[in-house]
Every structure is written in C-alpha cells, then in structure tokens.
Image (cartoon, rainbow, N blue to C red):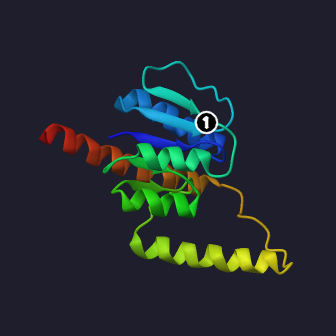
Amino acid sequence: MFIWVDADACPKVIKEVLYRAADREEVQITFVANQRLSVPPSTFLRTLQVPAGFDVADNEIVRRAQKGDLVVTADIPLAAEVMEKGAIALNPRGERYNEATIRERLTIRDFMDTMRASGVQTGGPASLNQRDRQQFANELDKWLLQRRKTLSAQ
C-alpha cells in the first residue's frame, strides 16, 4: 500500500506532513509532477517527473495506483478514476472522497466549467487554513492506521 501525490498543485504544508509521515510510518510516497521536484533525503520518498502535457501526471498516477493505495489530489476526475481502481482518494483539505461526494464534486466542477465558459468569473478555492491542515493529517493518520492493521494481518 503506497501513497501517490499529485504534486504539481499539492500545497507545501501538505507535502511537509507527508514527508514526516513517510519516515515515521515507513510508507513509500511518490510525488508525481511534470516539473522537477526535490524532497528531503529518505528511503521512503520518491519523485517521478513525467513529460509536460495535459493530464500526463494524472494518467501516470491512475496507471500505477492499486487497490488500497492512497492518492492525494484535489483533481476531481483523477480522484474518480483511482477510486474506480479501489484506491483511496484524499484531497489536501482532508476530505476523503466517497462515491456520493465524488459524483457531487464532478457535477459542481462541470457546472463551474460551464459558468466560466460563459464568461462568469467564479474565483478560486479559499486558502488552505490550519483546520484544513489538521483535517488532512487526521485523515492521513486514519489511512496509516488501517494500513498497519492490514499489514499485521498478513
């Protein structure tokens, strides 16, 4: 069970939470991006640079993610695709997607795309705050606990 991070848009504070968790829990985390990334030295942290292009990093994550893996992303279509493969999708604000929330987010995303295409200024998401960071850390800890239970049962 691995962690895959859609690293192009992942906030730095969330990456730092993941860096600490990798060594503490001895879990492999791969940061996937279309630009060069640097991570702290660790046998548990890896980077994977993919070519620039639309959804290239997303497609690579979908290709590699397996059932039970955790994928950290704010990209709704990516989250939906990895969930179809049995992976867990968690956004940087600490929301763990499920079937109901992913359908809702896809509908809202499509609606907002239509609004923007009509010329309506929709603005972006609110800044990540302390509550979001704590919620992310809590959800990450829940996944890590489940991982430990799964590994000890094997």
- x, y percentage for residue 47? 55, 29
Circle 1 — which element?
A: loop
Q: Residue at x 51, y 32 (%)?
A: 19
Q: Is residue 126 visible?
A: yes
Closer to the camera, 65 or 144? Answer: 65
Closer to the camera, 76 or 150? Answer: 76
Q: Quadrant of the N terminus?
A: top left
Q: Does 117 sit left or right of 23 as displayed?
A: right
Q: Amino acid at mark 1?
A: Val
Q: Is residue 74 above or below residue 20?
A: below
Quarter where residue 36 is shown: top right
- x, y percentage for residue 143? 35, 49
Q: Residue at x 79, y 69 (%)?
A: 123
Q: Is residue 95 visible?
A: no
- x, y percentage for residue 139? 42, 53
Closer to the camera, 55 or 69? Answer: 55
Quarter where residue 75 is shown: bottom right
Quarter where residue 145 is shown: top left
Question: Total number of numbered labels?
Answer: 1
Q: Is residue 136 above or below residue 40?
A: below
Task: Estimate how packed mark 1 is, as few (under 14), some (14 to 19) or many (20 or more) residues with alpha carbons within 10 Å.
Answer: some
- x, y percentage for residue 49? 60, 32
Q: Does 148 sit left or right of 19 as displayed?
A: left
Residue tagged 1: 50
Q: Please, which residue is most extreme toward the left here?
A: 153
Q: Residue at x 38, y 62 (%)?
A: 84
Q: Residue at x 46, y 50 (%)?
A: 62
Q: Does 114 sit left or right of 144 as displayed?
A: right
